[in-house]
C-alpha cells in the first residue's frame, strides 16, 4: 500500500464509520444515534443525574449515547403477544438508567418522568402514534411512543427510539410534527394522542386524532 493510499484511507474510514445504518422503516429500531461526548453530563446513579441535569438537551444527549434497542422485548410488547399473555411492566426511570436497554415506551417514560423532576415547567408528556399495522416475525405492531415538551409556546419531540438523541422542533403544533414524522418514517399514521401517562387506562387529556384518508 502506497503512502498516498494510506493517507486517503486514514481520512475516509472514520467518516464511513459514522454514517447512519439504514433501518427497516416498519420497525422502531434506531436508524442512527445523535450524541456528542462534549454534551453528555454523565452520572453514577439516577439520583445524581437528577441533581446535575437541568435541560431536555442534557437528557436527550444521554439517551443518544446510552440507549440500546431491545428487539426481542418489542415482540413481547406487540399486540400479538400481549393479547395472549400477562402484560410486561414498563421500566421505571431508575431501572432504565442502570440498564438503558428497552423499547420506545421505556424510553419515553424515562424522558417524561425525568423532565417532570428536573424541568417541570416544560410540561412534558407522551405522544402515542398509531401507525398502519405491520407484521414483523409474525407479530402485529402499530403503536409508537415519543416524549414531548414545550418551550416558549413551541412543541419539541424527542426520546424517539428510531433516532435516539434527536430533538425535533420547534413546532407550533403536534399536527405539524406528525406531518413531518409520517414523511420521515414512510408509514401511514392513522391517529395520534397526547397523553399524560403511558398507561392508556389513565388517559386524562382530550384525544387528538389525525386521520389520513389517502391510500
Image (tube, rainbow, N blue to C red):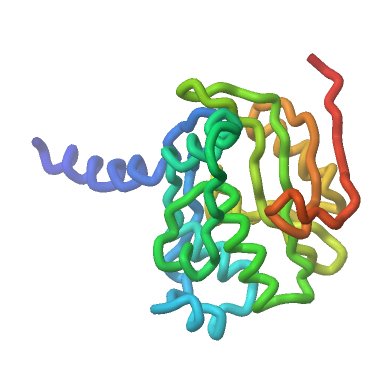
Taking the image as shown, residue 5 lies to the left or right of residue 135, namely left
Q: Is residue 31 visible?
A: no
Camera-side residue of 179 and 76: 76
Taking the image as shown, residue 157 lies to the left or right of residue 9, namely right
Q: Eyeballing the image, is 165 above or below 124?
A: above
Taking the image as shown, residue 14 lies to the left or right of residue 157, namely left
* Numbered disc total: 0
Q: Eyeballing the image, is 134 above or below 85?
A: above
Spot occupied by residue 98 in the image (x, y as percentages of width and height): 41, 67
* Residue furthest top in the image: 215
Spot occupied by residue 109 in the image (x, y as percentages of width and height): 61, 59
Camera-side residue of 76 and 53: 76
Give the residue displayed 76% in from the left and 51% down from the top: 201
Spot occupied by residue 174 in the image (x, y as percentages of width and height): 82, 48
Give the residue displayed 48% in from the left and 76% down from the top: 46
Spot occupied by residue 86 in the image (x, y as percentages of width and height): 54, 43
Camera-side residue of 49 and 22: 49
Amino acid at each position: 500500500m502506497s503512502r498516498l493510499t494510506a493517507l486517503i484511507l486514514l481520512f475516509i474510514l472514520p467518516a464511513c464509520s459514522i454514517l447512519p445504518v439504514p433501518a427497516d422503516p416498519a420497525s422502531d429500531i434506531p436508524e442512527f444515534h445523535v450524541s456528542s461526548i462534549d454534551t453528555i453530563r454523565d452520572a453514577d446513579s439516577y439520583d445524581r443525574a437528577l441533581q446535575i441535569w437541568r435541560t431536555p438537551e442534557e437528557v436527550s444527549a444521554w439517551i443518544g449515547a446510552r440507549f440500546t434497542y431491545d428487539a426481542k422485548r418489542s415482540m413481547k410488547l406487540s399486540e400479538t403477544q400481549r393479547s395472549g399473555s400477562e402484560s410486561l411492566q414498563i421500566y421505571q426511570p431508575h431501572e432504565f438508567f442502570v440498564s438503558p436497554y428497552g423499547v420506545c415506551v421505556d424510553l419515553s417514560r424515562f424522558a417524561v418522568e425525568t423532565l417532570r423532576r428536573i424541568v417541570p415547567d416544560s410540561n412534558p408528556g407522551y405522544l402515542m402514534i398509531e401507525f398502519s399495522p405491520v407484521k414483523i416475525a409474525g407479530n402485529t405492531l402499530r403503536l409508537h411512543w415519543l416524549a414531548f415538551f414545550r418551550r416558549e409556546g413551541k412543541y419539541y419531540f424527542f426520546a424517539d427510539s428510531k433516532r435516539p438523541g434527536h430533538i425535533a422542533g420547534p413546532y407550533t403544533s403536534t399536527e405539524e410534527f406528525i406531518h413531518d414524522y409520517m414523511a420521515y418514517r414512510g408509514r401511514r399514521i392513522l391517529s395520534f394522542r397526547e397523553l399524560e401517562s403511558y398507561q392508556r387506562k389513565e388517559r386524562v387529556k382530550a384525544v387528538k386524532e389525525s386521520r389520513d384518508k389517502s391510500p
